[in-house]
Image (spheres, helix red, strand yellow):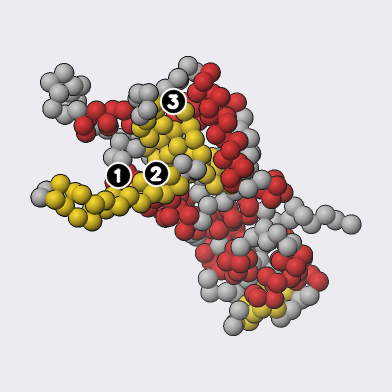
Amino acid sequence: MKNYLNNTCREEIEMVFQENPGPLSAVEVIHIIYKRHPGKPWKENTIRAHLIGLSMNHPSGKHYPTLQEHAFLDFLGNGRYKLRNRLETAIVKTTKPANTAIEKIVEDVDEIEEEVTATTNVGKMNEIKWMSLVLSLINTKLSENGQKDLAASQGRKLPYAFEVLAYEDRTPTQKNIIAYETDILIYETIGSHEWKPRVVMEGKLGSVTTHDAITYSQKALTHKNVHPYLRYGIILGNRKHYPLPGRLFRHGAFFDFMLSWKAIEPSDEEMNRLIALILEEVEASRNLDEILYNSRNPNRARYTLLHRPLKLG
């Protein structure tokens, strides 16, 4: 008997309609898939998007060109679908305009990337445990590189708001500090009891939603409001062959860096790239620190150019 645990969302939907040609509502399809997979490897919106893309006649189907190439459903209205006759499907496909296959590629790719969550490895490790693994790897590599003043911590709270409740003359006398927890914080010790945050890294396993991208980017902005020299980024794990999703580029305006690993544990190349990136970001943080807070020192470094290049890899 075929093992369906590693099916894609498209294959699962096809299997549902092979067993029951319909009509079936989107809710019924979701219920059948979730009953078969209690771990809910695909979000409801992802399944709904696939139903649209796999329908030959859905008005929004053109936005999912890759799925349209495999379309086998008829959309009946009111969120209901049925299996299309194979002969009808073949006829429609041969008369379909060729240029529809390239319409809105970006939206289609972003939707399909949600399938990366349907892996057995993600189910075995949550993001907190994964961040603990990443933390251990970073601290080991920093130590091996002789970075005695740098260390990483997990779950440390960092202020994002500093509220003044009262003043005495012009001096704040009552203050309220509000903090967010960070996934990984790389900090620098600057004395026996003092330290400075240099780099914050948020972590996500598998896919990242538009909501995630907006939320983390806004979190980066609020932390930078209190720490203007702070560098902020996001790391994705267990991405398989998928690249960084377009939604991160679109909505991650306040990230200084983004990177992804193919598996949960990095290859040597991926780990070396991460450490090199961290050291570059720490140096950038130090430079911003000096520019912002050492501007009156006559011996300060003087700059006449600031250029933020776009580096892709």
**Between 45 and 8, which is closer to the camera in this rendering?**
45
Badge 3: residue crowd in 10 Å (few <14, some 14–19, many ≥20)? many
Q: Dividing the picture into quarters, in which one does residue 95 lie?
A: bottom right
**Between 266 and 189, which is closer to the camera in this rendering?**
189
Asked whether, in this view, residue 94 is left or right of residue 7, the answer is left
Which three-letter amino acid code belongs to the residue tagged 3?
Leu
Mark 1 and mark 2 in contact? Answer it, CB < 8 Å: yes
Choose the circle earlier in sequence order: 3 or 1: 3
Badge 2: residue crowd in 10 Å (few <14, some 14–19, many ≥20)? some
> What residue is disc 3 on?
150
**Between 56 and 95, which is closer to the camera in this rendering?**
56
> What residue is disc 1 on?
226
Which three-letter amino acid code belongs to the residue tagged 1?
Val
Rendered-image quadrant of the N terminus: bottom right
Choose the circle earlier in sequence order: 1 or 2: 2
Q: In percent of the image, x 59 and y 46: which residue is there?
A: 127
- For mark 3, give the secondary structure: strand
> What residue is disc 2 on?
158
Q: In percent of the image, x 57 and y 66: which residue is there?
A: 45
- For mark 2, give the secondary structure: strand
